[in-house]
Amino acid sequence: MKVHQLIKDIRGEQKAAAPFRLGTIPAGYVSGEPTVIFDGEETASTRTFPVADHVTTLAAGKTVLVAMTGKRGGGIIIAAYTR
């Protein structure tokens, strides 16, 4: 770890992760917890994401809004729509 990063960590100046991310459900998705291709990335996540109960229109090609949780890249899909 570099000294400047250590000082930032001690002071609590770490950059906060974005609370929400947009992405697309990849082709081939049929059902269950999907992976997501986040905007600005070319490949689907290795992680699958649970879907909020009120999201009923999930399908391949849909744009999704993911509410990110925790530091390990977890999240929940809270909205799906067509761009």
Image (cartoon, rainbow, N blue to C red):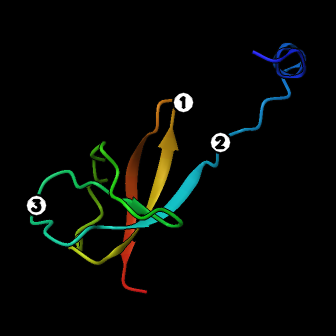
- Residue at (78, 30) in percent of width and height: 14
Q: Splitting the image into 4 quarters, where does residue 25 fall?
A: bottom left
- Mark 2 vs mark 3, CA separation in Å: 28 Å
- In the displayed image of the protein, which residue is found farthest to the left? 30
Q: CA distance from mark 3 to mark 1?
A: 26 Å
* Residue at the disc numbered 1: 71
Asked whether the residues under the numbered discs 2 and 1 touch, taking CB atoms below 8 Å apart as contact, a structural biologist would say yes
Q: Say whether disc 3 or disc 1 marks the residue closer to the N-terminus.
A: 3
Q: Nearer the viewer, residue 36 or 65?
A: 36
Give residue 40's position: percent from left, percent from top: 53, 66
Q: Are marks 2 and 3 in contact (CB under 8 Å)?
A: no
User: Dot 3: few (<14), some (14–19), or many (≥20) neighbours within 10 Å?
Assistant: few
Give the spatial CA distance, label 2 vs label 1: 8 Å
* Residue bearing mark 2: 17
- Quarter of the rendering containing residue 71: top right
Indicate whether 83 appears above or below 69. Answer: below
- Pointer 3 residue: 31
Q: Amino acid at mark 1?
A: Lys
Residue 5 drawn above or below residue 82: above
x and y percentages locating residue 54 in the rendered image:
30, 62
Question: What element does badge 3 sit on?
Answer: loop
Q: Is residue 49 above or below residue 34?
A: above
| Extreme residue in the bottom direction | 83
What secondary structure is marked by label 1? loop
Which is more N-terminal, label 1 or label 2?
2
Tell me the amino acid under the disc marked 2: Ala
User: Residue at 60% across / 48% down in the picture?
Assistant: 19
Which numbered circle lies on residue 58?
none
